[in-house]
Image (spheres, grey):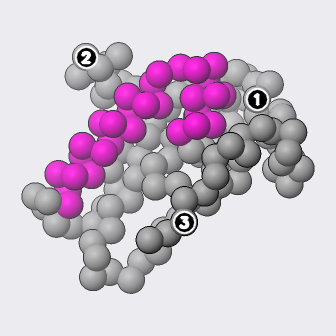
């Protein structure tokens, strides 16, 4: 079993190695999409995502946000996405939807690939 990381270090003042974190928090962001990559166990593919905000590398689901001002896109984990969007619930809803798709892909199609959902799809499905 992998050791779960302690998430109590969310206190940004303790993270001196993540330079842009403060700027990220002071910007306005728009939610774009959530995605994950489904691996099938026989594959020797390791895909890890790193959160642009806190540097966490244990991400299975990544959330893409777009800067409202300059259009820059970043990929972050759910905690940071929620924080950057001022406690918005969209990241959680999106991640649940991607989890559902991931399970389908794993159990029904048994093929590796990317699962994702964007805001438009969530709206179309009446989730937002
Ligand atoms: Zn993060």
Q: Which residues are magenta?
A: 78-106
For image coordinates 76% across by 34% down, the residue present is 24
**Is the N terminus in the top left, top right, bottom left or bottom right quadrant?**
bottom left
Q: Is residue 117 visible?
A: no
Where 115 falls versus 83 (above or below)? below
Find residue 40 and report its image quarter: bottom left
Alpha carbon distance from label 1 to label 2:
29 Å
Position of residue 112 measured from the top left corner of the image (x, y, whole percent): 28, 66
Find residue 128 and report its image quarter: top left
Magenta stretch: residue 113 in it? Answer: no
Where 111 falls versus 87 (above or below)? below
State the predominant SS element of the stretch in magenta: helix
* Left/right of residue 67 with respect to residue 1 in the rendered view: right
Q: Is residue 113 visible?
A: yes
Which dot marks residue 3? 3
For image coordinates 64% across by 46% down, the residue present is 7
For image coordinates 47% across by 22% down, the residue present is 89
Earlier in the chain: of badge 1 and badge 2, it is 1
Earlier in the chain: of badge 3 and badge 1, it is 3
Magenta stretch: residue 86 in it? Answer: yes
* Left/right of residue 55 with respect to residue 50 in the rendered view: right
* Left/right of residue 53 with respect to residue 65 in the rendered view: right
Look at the numbered disc 2 and give the secondary structure of its residue.
loop
Q: Please name the residue that numbered disc 2 is placed on.
A: 126
* Left/right of residue 71 with respect to residue 88 in the rendered view: right
Which dot marks residue 25? 1
Earlier in the chain: of badge 2 and badge 3, it is 3
Position of residue 54 measured from the top left corner of the image (x, y, whole percent): 71, 47
- Disc 1: CA contacts within 10 A as few (<14), some (14-19) or many (>=20): some
- Disc 3: CA contacts within 10 A as few (<14), some (14-19) or many (>=20): few
For image coordinates 50% across by 47% down, the residue present is 62
């Amino acid at each position: 079993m992998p050791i779960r990381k302690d998430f109590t270090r969310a206190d940004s003042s303790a993270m001196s190695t993540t330079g842009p974190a403060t700027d990220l928090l002071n910007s306005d962001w728009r939610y774009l999409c959530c995605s994950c990559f489904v691996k099938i166990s026989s594959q020797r593919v390791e895909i890890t995502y790193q959160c642009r905000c806190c540097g966490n590398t244990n991400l299975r689901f990544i959330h893409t946000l777009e800067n409202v001002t300059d259009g820059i896109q970043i990929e972050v984990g759910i905690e940071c996405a929620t924080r950057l969007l001022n406690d918005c619930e969209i990241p959680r809803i999106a991640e649940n939807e991607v989890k559902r798709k991931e399970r389908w892909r794993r159990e029904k199609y048994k093929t590796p690939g990317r699962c994702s959902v964007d805001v438009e799809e969530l709206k179309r499905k009446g989730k937002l």
